[in-house]
Image (cartoon, grey):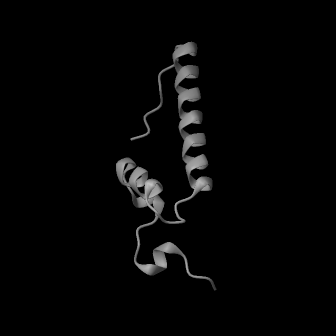
Amino acid sequence: MPAVAHDAGLPSAGDLTVPAYARAVAAHSPAPGGGSVAAVVGALAASLTAMVGHYSSGRPVPSLI
């Protein structure tokens, strides 16, 4: 089985704060790469779309926290 980042004692991308993730993306290393960055951007776009939908419909925003 191939080794993955969390097997090497490194934190997974899901465990990083936004500033730490941005620093990891900017670092001179192959991971995290464009795929995970695209996934984060897509998730943020979906969240903003949901926010606009809630504002437009007048329904209360469900609690996520």
User: Is residue 62 left or right of 41 when viewed as pictured?
Assistant: left
User: Is residue 45 left or right of 24 when viewed as pictured?
Assistant: right
Image: 40 above or below 1: above
Which residue occupies the foreground of this view, 25 or 16?
Answer: 25
> What residue is rendered at 41% in x and 72% in y?
10
Can you tell which quarter of the image residue 42 is in?
top right
> What residue is rendered at 54% in x and 65% in y?
30
Q: Measured from the top left, where is residue 36 in percent x and y?
A: 57, 54
Instruction: Name the quarter where the N terminus is drawn.
Output: bottom right
Instruction: Name the quarter where the C terminus is drawn.
Output: top left
Image: 57 above or below 35: above
> What residue is rendered at 52% in x and 25% in y?
51
Which residue occupies the foreground of this view, 3 or 28?
Answer: 28
Q: Measured from the top left, where is residue 3 in percent x and y?
A: 56, 81
Which residue occupies the foreground of this view, 55 or 10?
Answer: 10
Image: 13 above or below 53: below
> What residue is rendered at 47% in x and 74% in y?
6
